[in-house]
Every structure is written in C-alpha cells, then in structure tokens.
Image (cartoon, helix red, strand yellow):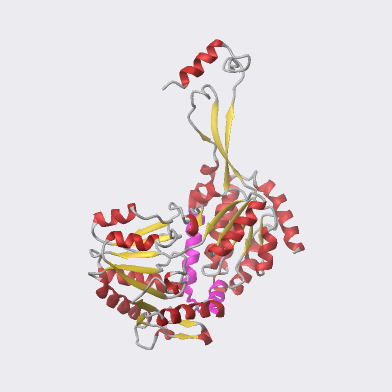
Amino acid sequence: MEDVKARFASLRKGSRTLAATTGAQRADRLRDMLAAVLANKQRFYDAAHTEMKACDLDVAAQLVMVKSEVDFVAKRVTKWMKPRRVRNSAATMGKKCYILHEPKGVVLNLSTWNAPIAIALVPAIAAISAGNAFALKPSELAPHSARVLKEVLDAAMPADEFAVFEGGPEVAQELLAQPFNHIYYTGGQRVGRVVMKAAAENFAAVTLEMGGKNPAIVDASAAIDNAARKIAWGRVANAGQVCVAPDYVLAHESVYERFVVSLVAAMAAMYNADGAGFDKSPELMRIINDQHFQRVSRLLQDALAKGAKFATGGQTRAADRFVAPTVITDVSEDMLVMQEEIFAPVLPVIPFRDKAEAIEMIERRTKPLALYIYAKDRATIDYFLAHTSAGSTVVNHNLIQSGTNPRLPFGGVNHSGIGRVGGETGFMEMSNPRSVVEQPLGLLDLTFNLPPYSKTYRKLIEKAIQG
C-alpha cells in the first residue's frame, strides 16, 4: 500500500513535466510503448493461452487495435494540441477567444481481463496523447497477462510517467483512495458504482465502460443465413466474453425457426467443422475462472428448470471451464439469462410479432452498450435506430465497431457506460478544455461597462435583451 502512495506521488510530479511536452514528444512515447508491446507479442500469446486457451490470432487482434490507435493518434496529436480559435460574440468583440486542451494530470485505468492488452492500452494512448501521467491496474483474473504488461511497460516507460500495479481488490481500493484526476474503468455495474463514489471524493472525472444486455434484432427482411453466421461469431468469439457481444436475439416470428436452424448450423460450421466436438475446437476459448464458470452453469440450469430448450450446446465441463456454444429457445422473462449479462457463448433467441413489441422488450432492460440490426428494409433500419438508444449500433454485422476505427467514439449510455474513448475523442476525454479570452490593451480596451453604469451602457443592455 505504501508503494501505491509513493508511485502516485511520483506520477503526480512527472505529470508536471508531461504537461509541457510537445506533440512530437508524446507521439514518440506512444511509439516506444507500441514497439515494446509488439516485441513481446509471443509472451502475450502464451499468457492468454494459459488463461483462456486463446489462440494467437485472438491476441493478435488486440495488438492490431493498439497499433492502429497509436498510428492514428501519433500522426495527429500535434494538431489536436494547437489552440482552437472560436468566433467572438457581441460581448467578446475585439478580444481573442480560444480553447486550450490541457492535461488533466494523473489518469488511472482499472482494466479488465477479457481483452487485457487492448483494454489496458487504448485508454493509455488517449491519456498519454493528452499529456497525462498514467497508472494501470490490470485485472488479477488474468494474472499472466498482467505480469507481462507490468514487465514490458515498466521497462519501456519512465517510472514517473507510467506505473503498473499488480494485485487484487485491495490494491484497486488503495488506488481509488488517491486523488487521481481521471479514472477509467471497464467492468460490471456493481464495481462501476464503487468507482464513481470513490471518484466523487476527489471530484475526479470518470470514463466507465460497463456493458449490459446487448440486443440483436433480426427483421423479417434480413438475410437470414448471413445474419446467423455473423451473430454466431459475435456471440462465441472470446467464449462470449466480449462487452459488445450480442446478448440475446429478437427474431421476427416469420423467420424465427429458420434463423434458429441457421444459427445452430453456423455455430457447428465454425466451432465443430470436423465433428469432433465443440471442446476440440482450437478457436473456442474457455471461461476465465471457476467462479465465472459456476455463474454460467447456474444460468443454464436456471433456464432449463424454467422450461427453456437448447437448440444446440448446453454441455459444460468444470475441469477446463468449457462451455459449449449454446442456443436457448422457449425463453421467458423470468429466466436469469434475460436478467443478467451472460458473458459466455450462450445465446437466447426470442420471437417478436412487430417492431413495437421488439422495442418494448428492449426497453425492459437498461440502455445497452451495443445494439445490432439485421435487415434489408431501409424503413425498418431507420425505425429501430430512431426508437432505441445504445452506445453503438451496427447494421447487418456485429462487434466490428469496437477498436476498429479511431474516428468512431466508443462508450456506453447510462448503465452501460459514461464517456467515450478512441482517436481524437479519447484525447478530448483525457483533456481539460480551458477557455481563454485575451483582452488587448489600448483603443480596444473598453471599460464603459464598469460601474458607475452609463446611460449608453444601459441602452445597449436593454437593446440586447429585446426579442
């Protein structure tokens, strides 16, 4: 705990130096960080395989996200840092008005385990580009990845600019007790509330990414086989442990049965192509730990006990935390799979009669991090966009909005998140937009609006408030 306080003090001191860095210097820091991470990619591959039986390409996808973000930001950060002139109002006529984006100071990232590299470093890229010192607390649920992150980043980054803290909840609590200027958190809503309360003690700004129940709507006009294959991948990728994964499907009653059949076939084609069994697939990852495995098993048992059927899957194995890709039908609202974020390769599919009923089903839950629409009909697409709210939406695909385009801000709405990150949006999120007005001296330095108020000034004010 004393190390936390000492390292924070060092970061705070280093933040003063960072505030004066140029865009080129910040870009160099980002490129140094990226080079160190890529040089150790095999260590990250090995760590993720040990933790979740991830294949190399799963981890490489995170590295691609980090690299594309660094490349984009490093090229543009100098431009973003320039003072931004704004037009004068009547009250500021003759004055110089502009906005300076200054660093907030010291940023804390309480990262999570399901994409430990990307979720650790994308916020770091935003913070560094804005000139902040950065503290990273990787999740203890992915200890091998956390160890590699610490060793690689401690060696690559100056100690008074970037610190990595390993440990469990007690370390996170001690970090939250420090007067950070901004806190970035990825995880569940329960801990999100804890983070917000801790941030309030020091009036720290927060960015929260908390997921939720992400719906996928399959309209009668959808390309059914195409939708089924994409949704199967979106749900089973990373063993379903993705914050933007589709969490349940609302399929129009006219295509419901055909969609379920196609979804089952798509899961088999991708994760059991040779017929040896889902558990033999090299692309099917495992649930992160025993506690989460038991939670998923409880969801499956609860669904069966309340009348659900498994169109495919349902098999589990505690020894290696295996959960088969599972499609659940005959779903009711009282089932836990419709009340909790599933975070596993398990997908409930529910029929709906019309668009209004689909909206009603979605509104029974809090606003999602992501929402997916599968349809060919333009009016239907526009209807669902206009009558729903989500952090992001993809039409006729899923997952492709997260970490793939630095020009798209990423984040949630209310329960699914607060704030945004990515590209220039991330730079803004980690900056304080400081308004500056410069009053020139001389002929333009008018003081007729100061007491005692003249008749001329009174007339000007009266004229200004007239309709």
Magenta-colored stretch includes residue 88: no
Q: Which residues are magenta?
A: 44-72
Q: Is residue 434 visible?
A: yes
Query: Which of the two residues, 235 or 387, is positioned nearer the viewer here?
Result: 387
- Decide: is 366 above or below 293: above
Picture coordinates of residue 426, whole percent (x, y): 52, 51
Q: State the image quarter where residue 337 is shown.
A: bottom left
Q: State the image quarter where residue 361 is shown.
A: bottom left
Picture coordinates of residue 345, whole percent (x, y): 42, 75
Picture coordinates of residue 222, whole percent (x, y): 25, 65
Which residue: 37% across, 62% down?
A: 362
Picture coordinates of residue 159, whole percent (x, y): 70, 58
**Quadrant in which the C terminus is drawn:** top left
- Residue reaching furthest to the bottom: 276
* Magenta portion: prevailing SS class: helix
- Decide: is 317 above or below 350: below
Query: Which of the two residues, 419 or 126, is positioned nearer the viewer here?
Result: 419
Magenta-colored stretch includes residue 45: yes
Q: Relative to 302, is 165 on the left or the right?
A: right
Q: State the image quarter where residue 35 is shown.
A: bottom right
Query: Which of the two residues, 273 or 447, is positioned nearer the viewer here?
Result: 447
Q: Relative to 6, is 70 on the left or the right?
A: left
Count all numbered tags in the image, as a single digit.
0
- Decide: is 261 above or below 28: below
Which residue: 50% across, 60% down?
A: 67
Q: Is residue 395 visible?
A: no
Query: Which of the two residues, 355 or 178, is positioned nearer the viewer here?
Result: 355
**Quadrant in which the N terminus is drawn:** bottom right
Which residue: 56% across, 80% down?
A: 290
- Residue reaching furthest to the top: 455
